[in-house]
């Protein structure tokens, strides 16, 4: 009996020495996402994270340019980044789009939309004076990202005001494009009504940016009068103007970031390092380096070298009228540059599909910190919406909507005269074509051309390999269809 | 108390018998050392009469009938029997038993003799470690134990290894649980192999006693300690030696290079760059420049001894090793100091303790990646000298963004990782009521890891990704702490001399915490590494604080376990284990799990019908089955945390404009729970020919279910790291066979040979959803991932195009299926697997995998008079390696087999033409997959012992001198540096980006014992 007692005591002692199950219930030192949004600062910090994905535009505007007839893919070889080589040749498919292709871009945009919706999900949790402003910025960003989605893929799953949780992804259908546009319009109308222009130049969303994007969204739907209204309101009452002809050559230089012509600008920086492992983590604008000439040594000390992607075609070079101020700023003719700047050189044979031209607006400049991977950490901002774009959009809306060719002509000629080109005097279809032509040369290298051709029905005639009824939209990556329950049909033709 | 002690030791025999006759007394000593053997059992055979020797090895046994047999036994010695005549004084010398059935094997919270074991447990003893002289203990496992495969991750000094026990069972972390004296150890580089007494590898359900962490097997390492009643001994072990690369890859010399490059340019329609090939000559041999002969030195001393109730050990060691690449730029230095002390407060109340302080200092160079040192040595153009006419390092212009001058790269690399680790254990055991033992042990680790790197301003050529215009320094300081507390009670008894019962009941608590910190500084004065510290102190940027990220972690495990061991007359054996584990890694509904396992054994050779035949010294059949767990995923993956990246700039591009936002991190899955492994083992142990031949063979099947995979998920969920889900099944089915033969032919000559072979078939049965797969493993530049985990294939198989020779003419091309890039004569003809007339991604097939079909080890040792000789060989068969150290750029150098390239119709049907123009030859195909099978002579050693026979020379007891060579010969068809090296990743392993090869090492060493 005594033995039993001792055993009992020992077992009890053992139990005492050990812990209760509570021992393995510990909270992480990291904040739980369900218990956030308790102060204004929480909202502001979540909003910063929603802005973060604007920086993924580096890839979008580069791909948009390569998809068009403005540039060839280039790069090192025919197998360098196959997905973008294929887009250039209009032979892209839903397959092989991971790791930097269309699937990556799709994922980025949904991360971005989810970050906005995270704020929206908790918008009523805590009150503070600036909240409407925070929500207005959030809704602008959501509209910006959704607009990218509809431009690239048409009908897309539309997520509203809440994050999606793991497991939800199998029950979401593609929403008709028109409904997504309706949300974009709602968001932008709210943003335009609740923001002002006091934050001009900081990288924050302004009323003007919301108006410009709203006008663009209308134009993409051929809603010409709505587009004209909002864009003319911005032109007449907004804070922006074109840079002068004297100022213009500086438009894409670092010292002129967030200038008065820039209606909305994506901010990049060189202070953080970066690696090829996480493109969405980059703070730099990687595509400017990718666009540069291989092995470029610039004796003038202005340009950095690059990976020879996104090279302009002779056709787009020829689209510039003689005397066009914009040519020198838009196109780098490498052979000419080397002649003009003795001691300069580049590796002529090192790249694929080289034309001798480079996208001068968005190639890397020398002089940044080059921390980490120098190719990925360039600080050159992307001028996402310029006032010249606004003027040309307004002109197009006024002309194509049959509202006023006179006012359309005024806006068009503002752009032309800034480029030191003579005024034109067209009406009707001729004016439409003149606006189209002006858009191409004004905005070359900025990623708009492909979508302009598609929305105006001209892509098949302008882009080699473009199949009407198919290539207006990009394919939904095969994995995305499979991993969302296989309930979506593929875009036509793929 | 003393009596209780005696009682325990003689429990089985201790009953009183009446009698008369004579009293016998004497001394028992160790036949080798002459030291007394205390605690030895003395038994009068066929009676229950017995005693044990005392502290001085003395014994007295009274009342023994003349003519009866006395049996003297002690763990670790051969049992000695003597027939009693009228001699009342006996001096017995016990011979140490090198491999007896009574050999004690550590099985987790206890020990068993080899004979009693019912699981698949292998032991590597200190003699193996001493013979192999590994700098890391993983090296002592390679080829020694069936079922254990060790892949060296890098040949760099102090480089890690990946141990896999019985195949790769998971796509995640498949490392086994490693416990050193009960202490969890993740980084084996801090352990001095000299301190290790034995390594016990639990390969099957026996590991179930470790529950949720046991699925990948468990390695129990026991360190050396002194023995009671042992005079103070001092041992010195030391060696010096040098290391060389095992191989250089034959490359083109400058003239050959010029010819090939010109050809490539011409084929691509460009002007050949070299006008005059005659000036190129041999050029620079970059591999010769990069590789060097590097020294290695180790010294260690061990002091140990024991008194009547205590034992102690102190050891101290110093190892320093330069690298064959970069010399002291990849130096690894380790200091270890260990002390342990055991004390019996009372005969039934014992204390043990140990404390180890280790410091390591490791420097490293970029390796096994695009742009790493060896990658550059292979790709750097041979027409470029190391230094230009001004004495500056030459630039690597024109060779692509990643290829730079490797000598300049090494010169500009400054990094080091310092580890200071203190670990220890303390334990008490109390023996009571004859049959009970209570034990409480605490183990702890405390490590400080300091990393430093300096990236100077440097320029390697135009457009190089490694160019730096702003220098920077980083210093990290991480603290890791953990402790394990184990408490358990054992009950041991034998009923009716036949039923032996052993019950264990215990609890274990594990907690690991840590704090990470790091600071960076830029614009270091004078671009000088010497000023880096100053900048880090004066103008630091805290990478955690500033970003609002959390630098702390806290992981815990709470466990209860019970084990029943039972045998009937040592013939029928049974063991059953159940463990309950709770882990912080899983959410509220899934924190706790139960892991049952069991095993049975039958010692057939003890049956009467077999005991007549003397053929089998041992014949044992055993089987085990159990459910084991794996929880090796990160912490808190069941809850959505705000630890994502979300940074933006407002008001400018500068540091002060940077705002660190808050975003969700990895995607959470509240449902996750541990991986479950159902493991079956059927084994046979056999000893024949008077224990001279020892055979162990096992069949096993390990089925891992609820695999913790991190599958691709819908992009709707965003870019956070995919959640872990329990989906997927992997099966490893295999067969192990080990045979050993040892014999002492005479006093002057003994010989032993051991051979083991393991064959494993690995198959992924399913991965999350239908048709889904996980992928990894990069190839070339921006090509799709080539390694996959997919149902029906081995884990991590390579997917790519199958080639069917080379197109010899345009006509052949016109009649063949082609892909996006139109081929020309001299390009690969790919097989159109689906017959759709187009070569596309659907035509990719299984091109092999990095998992060997079979591995085997062969160990031979031979002692002749004062010479000893040992040789160890290892072979790996049937694994594939992907050659990914070629840059595929027009001006880089190439292996010299390119000289046999296709140059016109009929010239070659396997190596394509050389061109800088558009071609599809660089896409991943079987052209880049090579057979990685190899046989390697891992170590050969020859020693000579000067024994100290004369009494008048007090200098030493033993003096041995030896020479040793490691990695002397490797037979392989693999054309890269080292087929034995791999990154060990389950998905993405076996891709060679310029592995740092294992060194060929020559040592001259001494062992002295005072």
Image (cartoon, coloured by chain):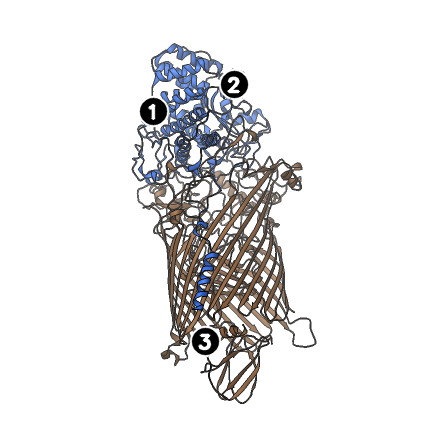
Considering every residue shown, the one lying at the far right of the view is B952
Percent across and percent down for residue B823 are 40, 40
Disc 1 or 2, which lies upstream in sequence? 1
Q: Where B53 falls versus B291 (above or below)?
A: below
Number of residues whose C-alpha sits closer than 10 Å to that of mark 3, classed few (under 14), some (14–19) or many (20 or more): some
Residue at 36% x, 43% y is B812
- Residue B107 seen in render: no
Residue A190: image quadrant is top left
Q: Is residue B969 above or below residue A1?
A: above
Location of mark 1 (residue): A182
The quadrant of the rendering that contains the C terminus of chain A is top left
Tag 3 and tag 1 share a subunit: no
Q: Are marks 1 and 2 in contact (CB under 8 Å)?
A: no
Label 1 sits on a secondary structure element that is: helix
Tell me the number on the disc at residue B12. 3
Kindly identify which chain the residue marked by label 3 belongs to: B
- Specify whether B618 is left or right of B27: left
Q: Does any portion of residue A74 appear in the rendered image?
A: yes
Q: Kindly report the distance in space between the C-alpha atoms of the residues bearing marks 3 and 1.
A: 88 Å
Q: Position of residue B623 (x, y in %)?
A: 37, 66
Residue A222 in the image: above or below residue A269:
above
Crowdedness of circle 2 by 10 Å Cα count: few (<14), some, many (20+)? some
Q: Residue at x 54, y 41 (%)?
A: B403
C-alpha separation, residue under disc 1 versus residue under disc 2: 36 Å
Residue located beneath label 2 in the image: A248
- Colour chain A appears in: blue
| Place of residue A480 in the rendered image (x, y in percent of width and height, measured from the top left) | 35, 38
Q: Quadrant of residue B404?
A: top right
Residue in the image at 47% along x and 19% along y: A197
Query: Color used for chain B?
Result: brown
């Amino acid at each position: 009996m005594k033995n039993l007692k001792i055993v009992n005591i020992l077992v009890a002692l053992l139990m005492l020495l050990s812990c209760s199950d509570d021992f393995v219930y510990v909270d992480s030192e990291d904040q739980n996402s369900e218990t956030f949004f308790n102060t204004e600062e929480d909202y502001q910090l979540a909003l910063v994270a929603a802005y973060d994905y604007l920086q993924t535009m580096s890839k979008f505007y580069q791909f948009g340019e390569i998809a068009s007839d403005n540039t060839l893919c280039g790069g090192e070889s025919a197998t360098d980044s196959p997905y973008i080589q294929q887009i250039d040749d209009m032979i892209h498919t839903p397959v092989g789009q991971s790791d930097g292709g269309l699937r990556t871009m799709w994922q980025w945009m949904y991360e971005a939309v989810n970050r906005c919706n995270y704020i929206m999900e908790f918008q009523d949790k805590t009150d503070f004076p600036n909240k409407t402003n925070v929500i207005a910025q959030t809704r602008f960003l959501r509209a910006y990202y959704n607009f990218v989605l509809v431009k690239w893929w048409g009908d897309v799953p539309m997520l509203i005001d809440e994050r999606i949780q793991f497991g939800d992804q199998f029950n979401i259908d593609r929403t008709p494009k028109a409904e997504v546009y309706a949300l974009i319009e709602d968001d932008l109308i709210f943003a335009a009504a609740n923001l002002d222009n006091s934050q001009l130049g900081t990288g924050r969303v302004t009323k003007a940016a919301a108006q410009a994007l709203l006008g663009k969204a209308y134009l993409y739907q051929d809603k010409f009068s709505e587009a004209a209204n909002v864009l003319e309101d911005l032109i007449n009452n907004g804070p922006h103007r074109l840079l002068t002809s004297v100022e213009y050559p500086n438009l894409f230089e670092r010292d002129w970031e967030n200038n008065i012509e820039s209606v909305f600008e994506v901010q990049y920086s060189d202070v953080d390092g970066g690696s090829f492992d996480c493109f969405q983590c980059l703070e730099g604008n990687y595509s400017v380096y990718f666009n540069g000439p291989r092995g470029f040594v610039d004796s003038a000390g202005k340009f950095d070298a690059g990976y020879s992607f996104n090279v302009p075609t002779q056709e787009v070079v020829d689209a510039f009228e003689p005397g066009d101020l914009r040519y020198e700023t838009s196109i780098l003719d490498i052979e000419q540059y080397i002649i003009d700047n003795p001691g300069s050189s580049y590796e002529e044979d090192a790249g694929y599909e080289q034309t001798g031209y480079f996208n001068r607006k968005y190639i890397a400049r020398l002089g940044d910190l080059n921390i980490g991977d120098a190719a990925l950490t360039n600080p050159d901002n992307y001028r996402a919406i310029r006032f010249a774009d606004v003027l040309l959009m307004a002109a197009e809306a006024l002309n194509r909507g049959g509202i006023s060719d006179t006012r359309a002509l005024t806006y068009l000629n503002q752009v032309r005269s800034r480029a030191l080109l003579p005024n034109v005097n067209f009406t009707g279809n001729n004016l439409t074509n003149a606006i189209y032509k002006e858009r191409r040369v004004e905005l070359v290298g900025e990623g708009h051309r492909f979508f302009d051709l598609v929305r105006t029905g001209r892509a098949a005639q302008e882009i080699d390999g473009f199949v009407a009824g198919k290539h207006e939209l990009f394919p939904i990556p095969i994995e995305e269809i499979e991993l969302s329950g296989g309930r979506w049909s593929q875009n036509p033709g793929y | 108390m003393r009596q209780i002690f005696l009682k325990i030791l003689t429990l089985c025999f201790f009953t009183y018998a009446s009698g008369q006759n004579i009293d016998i007394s004497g001394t028992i000593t160790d036949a080798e050392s002459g030291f007394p053997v205390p605690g030895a059992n003395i038994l009068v055979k066929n009676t229950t009469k017995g005693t044990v020797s005392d502290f001085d090895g003395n014994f007295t046994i009274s009342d023994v009938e003349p003519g009866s047999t006395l049996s003297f036994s002690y763990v670790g010695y051969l049992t000695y029997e003597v027939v009693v005549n009228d001699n009342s004084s006996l001096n017995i010398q016990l011979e140490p038993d090198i491999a007896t059935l009574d050999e004690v094997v550590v099985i987790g919270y206890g020990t068993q003799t080899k004979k009693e074991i019912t699981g698949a447990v292998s032991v590597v003893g200190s003699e193996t470690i001493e013979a192999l002289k590994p700098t890391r203990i993983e090296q002592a496992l390679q080829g020694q134990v069936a079922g254990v495969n060790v892949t060296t991750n890098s040949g760099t000094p102090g480089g890690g290894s990946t141990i896999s026990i019985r195949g790769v069972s998971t796509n995640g972390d498949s490392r086994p649980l490693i416990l050193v004296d009960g202490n969890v150890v993740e980084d084996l580089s801090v352990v001095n192999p000299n301190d290790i007494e034995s390594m016990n590898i639990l390969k099957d359900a026996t590991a179930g006693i470790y529950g949720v962490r046991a699925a990948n097997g468990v390695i129990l390492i026991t360190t050396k300690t002194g023995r009671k009643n042992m005079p103070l001994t001092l041992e010195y072990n030391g060696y010096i030696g040098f290391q060389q690369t095992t191989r250089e890859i034959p490359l083109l010399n400058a003239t050959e290079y010029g010819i090939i490059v010109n050809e490539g340019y011409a084929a691509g329609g460009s002007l050949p760059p070299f006008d005059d090939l005659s000036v190129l000559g041999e050029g620079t041999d970059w591999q010769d420049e990069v590789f060097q002969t590097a020294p290695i030195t180790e010294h260690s001393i061990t002091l140990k001894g024991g008194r009547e109730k205590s034992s102690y050990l102190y050891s101290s060691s110093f190892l320093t090793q330069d690298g064959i690449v970069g010399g002291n730029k990849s130096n690894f230095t380790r200091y270890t100091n260990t002390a342990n002390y055991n004390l019996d407060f009372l005969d039934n109340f014992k204390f043990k303790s140990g404390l180890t302080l280790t410091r390591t200092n490791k420097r490293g160079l970029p390796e096994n990646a695009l742009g790493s040192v060896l990658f550059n040595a292979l790709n750097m153009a041979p027409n470029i000298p190391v230094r230009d006419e001004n004495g500056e390092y030459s630039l690597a212009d024109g060779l692509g963004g990643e290829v730079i001058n490797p000598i300049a790269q090494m010169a500009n690399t400054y990094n080091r990782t310092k580890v200071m680790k203190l670990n220890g254990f303390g334990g008490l055991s109390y023996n009571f009521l004859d049959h009970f033992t209570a034990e409480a042990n605490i183990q702890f680790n405390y490590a400080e890891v300091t990393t430093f790197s300096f990236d100077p301003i440097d320029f390697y050529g135009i457009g190089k990704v490694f160019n730096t215009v702003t220098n920077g320094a980083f210093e990290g300081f991480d603290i890791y702490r953990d402790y394990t507390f184990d408490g358990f009670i054992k009950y041991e008894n034998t009923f009716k001399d036949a039923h032996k019962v052993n019950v264990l009941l215990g609890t274990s608590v594990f907690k690991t915490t840590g704090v990470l910190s790091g600071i960076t500084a830029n614009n270091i004065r004078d671009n000088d590494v010497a000023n880096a510290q100053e900048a880090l102190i004066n103008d630091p940027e805290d990478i955690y604080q500033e970003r609002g990220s959390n630098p702390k972690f806290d992981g815990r495990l709470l466990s209860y376990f019970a084990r029943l061991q039972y045998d009937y007359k040592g013939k029928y054996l049974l063991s059953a284990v159940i463990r309950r584990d709770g882990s912080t890694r899983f959410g509220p509904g899934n924190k706790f799990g139960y892991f049952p396992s069991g095993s049975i054994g039958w010692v057939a050779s003890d049956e009467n019908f077999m005991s007549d035949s003397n053929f089998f010294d041992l014949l044992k059949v055993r089987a085990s089955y159990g459910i084991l767990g794996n929880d090796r995923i990160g912490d808190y993956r069941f809850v959505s945390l705000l630890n994502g990246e979300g940074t933006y700039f407002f008001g400018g591009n500068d540091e002060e404009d940077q705002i660190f936002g808050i975003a969700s991190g990895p995607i959470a899955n509240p449902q996750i729970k541990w991986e479950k492994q159902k493991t079956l083992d059927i084994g046979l142990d056999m000893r024949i020919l008077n224990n001279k031949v020892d055979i162990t063979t096992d069949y096993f099947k390990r089925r891992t279910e609820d695999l913790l995979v991190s599958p691709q998920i819908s992009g709707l969920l965003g870019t956070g790291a995919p959640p872990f889900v329990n989906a997927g099944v992997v099966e490893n089915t295999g067969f192990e066979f080990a045979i050993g033969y040892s014999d002492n032919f005479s006093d002057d000559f003994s010989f032993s040979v051991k051979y083991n072979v393991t064959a494993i078939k690995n198959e992924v049965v399913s991965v999350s959803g239908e048709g889904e797969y996980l992928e990894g493993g990069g190839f070339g530049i921006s090509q799709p991932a080539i390694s996959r985990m997919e149902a029906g294939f081995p884990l991590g198989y390579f997917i790519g195009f199958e080639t069917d020779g080379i197109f010899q003419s345009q006509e052949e091309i016109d009649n063949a299926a082609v892909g996006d890039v139109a081929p020309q004569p001299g390009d690969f003809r790919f097989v159109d697997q689906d017959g759709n007339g187009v070569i596309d991604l659907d035509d990719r097939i299984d091109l092999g995998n990095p998992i060997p079909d079979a591995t085997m080890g062969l160990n031979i040792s031979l002692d002749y008079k004062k010479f000893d000789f040992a040789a160890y060989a290892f072979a790996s068969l049937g694994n594939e390696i992907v050659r990914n150290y070629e840059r595929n750029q027009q001006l880089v150098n190439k292996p010299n087999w390119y000289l046999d390239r296709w140059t016109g119709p009929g010239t070659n049907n396997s190596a394509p033409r050389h061109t800088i123009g558009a071609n599809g030859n660089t896409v991943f195909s079987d052209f880049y997959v090579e057979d990685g099978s190899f046989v390697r002579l891992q170590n050969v050693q020859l020693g000579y012992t000067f024994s100290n026979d004369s009494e008048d020379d007090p200098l030493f007891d033993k003096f041995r001198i030896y020479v040793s060579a490691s990695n002397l010969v490797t037979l392989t068809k693999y054309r890269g540096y080292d087929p034995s090296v791999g990154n060990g990743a389950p998905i993405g392993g076996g891709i060679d980006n310029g592995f740092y090869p294992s060194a060929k090492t020559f040592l001259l060493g001494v062992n002295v014992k005072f």
